[in-house]
Amino acid sequence: EVPVTTAELRKMKERKEPIVMITAYDYPSAKLADEAGVDMILVGDSLGMVVLGYDSTIPVTMEDMIHHTKAVTRAAKRAFVVADMPFLSYHGSLEESVKNAGRLMQEAQAKAVKIEGGVEIAPVVTKCVQAGIPVVGHIGLTPQSVHQLGGYKVQGRDPETARRLLTEAKALEDAGAFAIVLECVPEEVAGFITENIGIPTIGIGAGVKCDGQVLVFHDVLGYASNLKPKFVKQYAQIGEAITQAVLQYTAEVKERQFPSEQHTFTANEDTIKQLYG
Ligand code: KIV
Ligand code: NA
């Protein structure tokens, strides 16, 4: 199968074919997502919450991101894998930022990195792009700044903040980003930004007018994710299936129903005679 490229993603915007992105954090989830035909896989720093059990994305480290991205890129044959740059990994010197971005490509085989922020991170984007590192921007609700934003809430509802988002998006495009995630942005604002920039927008809680959509794997699957914001649609209840299976396994072990004959090895006749007489 032909791997998805940044050029192909841009063509998808031009022909108005929606881009499908989902997060994944390990080999089996990435394999299933890739085989199901998603265009992009995001190794999101949301892994801090959905697979590492932290209560925000802030504790996630470069080492965490590299470890999980390696597992995902081993599985993805077609999907374009983007890895998040974690908290504080792109706020030191430009050299240090590019070095961190480069590690996600060189050590973990990501095809691109995602960076939260707009105008203020444009120099980092430019520097990465100059170094051959494709960059996805991320504006609107940026979870790494949750304590500054005062919670997980919709961004760009009033005229000034909506304008500001367009300015941020344009700055990212000018800096060389090849796509932008819009998180928790009103549909009309996300649609306006989408029409007014040349690179694909990928929405999460940003309405149907974006060039693509992204959701968190565990949210899509109902897989032990306790958050259920308005923008999430659950397509399965995997958590319930897991609970039922583990409950049944537990009961069968307790009752010596498992293992049964079909799951058991038997010794040779003479071995049995030797042992039992
Ligand atoms: O970390 C993540 O999963 C993300 C998406 C929600 C865009 O950044
Ligand atoms: Na993220």
Image: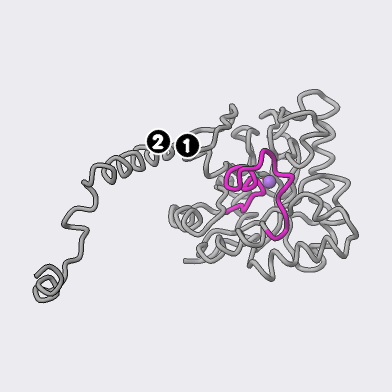
Dot 2 crowding, Cα within 10 Å, few <14, some 14–19, many 20+: few
Principal SS element in the magenta part?
loop
9, above or below 56, in the image = below
Percent coordinates x, y for residue 138 in the rendering: 73, 45
When the figure is inspected, residue 58 is found, relative to residue 106, above or below; the finding is: above
Report the mark closest to the observer, 2 or 1: 2
Q: Is residue 236 visible?
A: no
19 sits left or right of 254 in the view? right
User: Which residue is painted at 55% across and 47% down in the image?
Assistant: 20
Residue in the foreground of this view, choosing between 212 and 241: 241
Is the CB atom of the residue marked by disc 2 within 8 angstroms of ligand 1's nearest atom? Answer: no
The picture quadrant where one finds residue 95 is bottom right
Marks 2 and 1 close (CB-CB < 8 Å) = yes
Q: Is residue 236 magenta?
A: no
Q: Which mark is residue 240?
A: 2
Q: Secondary structure at mark 1?
A: loop
Q: Judge by depth and name the residue closer to the eye, 86 or 253.
A: 253
Mark 2 is on which residue type?
Glu
Classify mark 1: residues with Cα within 10 Å, few (<14), some (14-19) or many (20+): many
In which quadrant of the rendered image does the C terminus lie? bottom left
Q: Three-letter amino acid code at disc 1? A: Gly
Residue 234: x percent and y percent? 48, 34
Q: Which residue is mark 1?
A: 222
Q: Is residue 59 magenta?
A: yes
Label for residue 276? none
Question: Which of the 4 image quarters holds residue 153?
Answer: top right
- Measured as percent of width and height from the top left, residue 112 is found at 68, 60
Q: Is residue 82 visible?
A: yes
Image x and y of residue 189, in percent = 73, 31
Which residue is more in the foreground, 121 or 146?
146
Q: From which residue to which does the magenta span run?
A: 41-63
